[in-house]
Image (tube, rainbow, N blue to C red):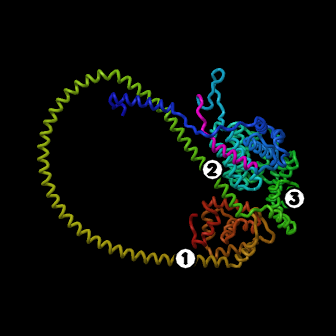
């Protein structure tokens, strides 16, 4: 468009572009008034804060003079110079109590500090422009140094206050409130600081926060969310490791969650990476990873239990504390339990239950000990562990409610973060386009303007003479052509008018004939359609009756099958027994070979093609596999089948998954088997 404009228009466009660029470069920065920058902070508190990141024990000693008494009664404190220092001191106290393994004794004051720092963050104004922008300062030798943003300390303290408040909620088992506080800390940091600014203490803080969320999701069995948090923690830990073992611990945590979620290949990769990033092998982290890899080899690589137990015993012998040694006992005891070596498993698990202080380890040991004494028929000992477990058992409704709520909170946080990132990327792209395109356009406009200015006068004179001569010739030709065109047009219009009148008469007559034909055809079509609808309604009635009859036949066949003597016997033996997910065997509840044969005969009496269809899908299916499918047909789940077949739950579940994949079934195997009686027919595909 610029090329085809006149000389005057080109000049105006060029001047306008220059004005736009100059206006953009000198646009004033809007600022709010009536609010101030963060108040000054006590140098003593700043010194305690700085020391806390390296020596939290020494930092706590230096902070205590701010309070009347020791950390056991932190609510009574000396009046400080400002409210800012008062809340800052209580935030530091809460952090240092946690880092030194003390309980939070200033919960009320900490929550006041959270509200106080949040209010300062909400009031924080945009920074006024300074020479060269924030962070630009001419230093010695002409170098540029970045100046700190005075608001940074406010946002960092607000985020820390939310984080340590979340720790307090977590220790009080208020998981939803803890998750809310952790996410508030992340939103405060990510909403104020650019990604490149999250280094040093801020990177460590982000690592701690994501680790906290990862641990919470791990406990609630939300492996996918835990992986997201641990991987984000790994990003910041790579920038500024929290310790010499921080990077290895992050990789190890990711590997565990990948293992739990069934991604064994990826899990093994992270285990190996965790080992590779350890600075030495004489530490508990190395022993933890090696023990986990041993269990991994047992579960996924088919390594024999004897070899694995020998490896675990060797790792246990390297333990440096009694607590670590007892923790290793739990792993050994669980494997022995899985292998049905009841007596040695009992010895290890009893030691864990009696000597381990970690409640979660005691719970895991108590579950297997309860099952062992149930199998031994020792009701007194079994009730002991049952009573212990009852004290730590949350109802399933409570568990699902907490899990669902923290899942919703984190998903909402991810959605908001994605939307914010999309907006930032769009703004960045627009700014980049403006910075790139506008200067180029201005430069091109100025160049064209200068070139055309020098050529304009000569071209205008030459063009003016040529245009005058051409204009005279064109006027003469136009006059002659116009006269001829008028006569031709008159004759053509008269001829067209006569032709149109004749065509209109013929078309009118044809239209009347066609309308009569259409009317007759429409009446015939309506009659044929009415007859077709009547036939379709009759067919629908027939199909509905057939479906009802087929459904009744299927229900009668199912009822007849379930009333078989062997079916009633099996269901009665297992119906009212409470079975845990880990349970494998149960005294006096075993499917005998005679009952198994009777069950197969009952299945074939009522479902004659049951085995033929399954074998057509998987010819290598064994009699044990067919027996598993017969028990599914009976309506039993994996835990009940494990007890009847004297197998572990994990073995039954694993075999069911293998059959499902081999048969090409996308849903569960039990759901597919039940199609025999729910649908009343055999389906060729799941």
Nearer to us: label 3 or label 1: 3
Q: Is residue 323 magenta?
A: no
Nearer to us: label 2 or label 1: 2
Q: Disc 1 marks which residue? A: 550
The rendered magenta stretch, by its main secondary structure, is classed as helix
Residue 587's spot in the image, x, y percent?
81, 69
Residue 413, label in figure? 2
Dot 2 or dot 1: first in sequence order is 2
Residue 226's spot in the image, x, y percent?
69, 50
- Cα–Cα gap, marks 3 and 1: 57 Å
Choose between 611 and 106: the one closer to the eye.
106
- Cα–Cα gap, marks 2 and 1: 51 Å
From this view, report whether residue 141 is shown above or below residue 493: above
Q: Quadrant of residue 50?
A: top right
Residue 25's spot in the image, x, y percent?
51, 31
Is the Cβ of the residue at disc 3 closer than 8 Å to that at disc 1? no
Dot 3 or dot 2: first in sequence order is 3
Nearer to us: label 3 or label 2: 2
From this view, report whether residue 517 is shown above or below residue 112: below
From this view, report whether residue 325 is shown above or below residue 475: below
Q: Tag 1's secondary structure? A: helix
Q: Quadrant of residue 612?
A: bottom right
Residue 419, label in figure? none
Region rendered in magenta: 109-131
Which residue appears at 71% of the width and 79% of the height? 565
Dot 3 or dot 1: first in sequence order is 3
Q: Disc 3 marks which residue? A: 350
Mark 1 neighbour class, 10 Å CA radius: few under 14, some 14 to 19, many 20 or more: some
Residue 128's spot in the image, x, y percent?
59, 34
């Amino acid at each position: 468009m610029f090329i085809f404009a006149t000389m005057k228009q080109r000049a105006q466009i060029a001047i306008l572009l220059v004005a736009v660029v100059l206006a953009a470069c000198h646009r004033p920065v809007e600022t709010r008034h009536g609010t101030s920058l963060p108040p000054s902070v006590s140098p003593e508190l700043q010194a305690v804060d700085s020391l806390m990141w390296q020596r939290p024990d020494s930092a706590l000693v230096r902070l205590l003079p701010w309070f009347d008494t020791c950390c056991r009664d932190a609510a009574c404190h000396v009046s400080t110079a400002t409210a800012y220092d008062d809340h800052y001191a209580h935030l530091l106290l809460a952090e240092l109590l946690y880092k030194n393994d003390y309980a939070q004794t200033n919960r009320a004051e900490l929550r006041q500090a959270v509200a106080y720092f949040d209010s300062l963050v909400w009031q924080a104004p945009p920074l006024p422009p300074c020479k060269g922008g924030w962070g630009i300062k001419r230093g010695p030798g002409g170098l540029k140094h970045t100046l700190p943003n005075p608001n940074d300390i406010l946002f960092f303290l607000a985020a820390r206050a939310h984080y340590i408040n979340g720790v307090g909620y977590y220790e009080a088992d208020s998981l939803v409130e803890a998750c809310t506080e952790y996410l508030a800390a992340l939103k405060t940091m990510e909403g104020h600081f650019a990604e490149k600014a999250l280094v040093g203490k801020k990177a460590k803080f982000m690592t701690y926060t994501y680790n906290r969320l990862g641990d919470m999701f791990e406990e609630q069995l939300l492996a996918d969310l835990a992986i997201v948090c641990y991987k984000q923690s790994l990003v910041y830990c790579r920038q500024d490791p929290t310790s010499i073992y921080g990077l290895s611990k992050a990789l190890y945590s990711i590997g565990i969650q990948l293992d739990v979620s069934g991604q064994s290949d990826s899990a093994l990769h992270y285990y190996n990476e965790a080992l590779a990033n350890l600075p030495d092998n004489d530490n508990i982290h190395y022993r933890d990873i090696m023990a986990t890899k041993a269990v991994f080899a047992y579960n996924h690589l088919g390594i024999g239990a004897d070899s694995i137990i020998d490896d675990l015993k060797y790792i246990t012998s390297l333990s440096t504390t009694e607590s670590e040694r007892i923790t290793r006992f739990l792993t050994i005891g669980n494997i022995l339990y899985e292998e049905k070596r009841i007596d040695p498993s009992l010895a290890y698990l009893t030691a864990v239950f009696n000597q381990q202080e970690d409640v979660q380890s005691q719970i895991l040991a108590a579950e297997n000990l309860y099952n062992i004494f149930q199998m031994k028929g020792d009701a007194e000992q079994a009730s002991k562990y049952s009573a212990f477990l009852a004290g730590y058992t949350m109802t399933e409704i409570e568990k699902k409610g907490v899990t669902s709520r923290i899942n919703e909170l984190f998903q909402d946080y991810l959605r908001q973060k994605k939307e914010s990132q999309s907006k930032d990327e769009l703004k960045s792209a627009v700014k980049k386009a403006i910075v790139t395109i506008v200067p180029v356009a201005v430069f091109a406009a100025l160049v064209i303007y200068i070139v055309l200015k020098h050529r304009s006068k000569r071209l205008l004179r030459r063009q003016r003479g040529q245009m005058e001569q051409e204009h005279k010739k064109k006027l003469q030709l136009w006059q002659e052509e116009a006269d001829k065109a008028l006569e031709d047009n008159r004759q053509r219009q008269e001829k067209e008018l006569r032709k149109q009148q004749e065509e209109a008469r013929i078309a009118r007559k044809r239209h009347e004939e066609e309308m009569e034909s259409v009317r007759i055809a429409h009446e015939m079509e309506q009659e044929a359609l009415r007859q077709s609808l009547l036939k379709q309604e009759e067919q629908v009635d027939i199909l509905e009756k057939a479906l009802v009859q087929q459904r009744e036949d299927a229900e009668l066949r199912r009822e007849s099958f379930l009333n078989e003597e062997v079916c009633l016997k099996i269901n009665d033996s297992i119906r009212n027994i409470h079975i845990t997910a880990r349970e494998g065997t149960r005294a006096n509840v075993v499917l005998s070979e005679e009952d198994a044969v009777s069950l197969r005969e009952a299945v074939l009496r009522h479902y004659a093609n049951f085995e033929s269809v399954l074998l057509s899908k998987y010819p290598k299916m064994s009699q044990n596999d067919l027996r598993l499918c017969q028990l599914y047909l009976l309506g039993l789940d994996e835990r009940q089948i494990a007890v009847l077949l004297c197998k572990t739950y994990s073995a039954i579940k694993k075999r069911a998954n293998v059959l499902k994949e081999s048969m090409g079934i996308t849903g569960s195997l039990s759901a597919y088997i039940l199609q025999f009686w729910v649908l009343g027919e055999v389906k060729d595909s799941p």
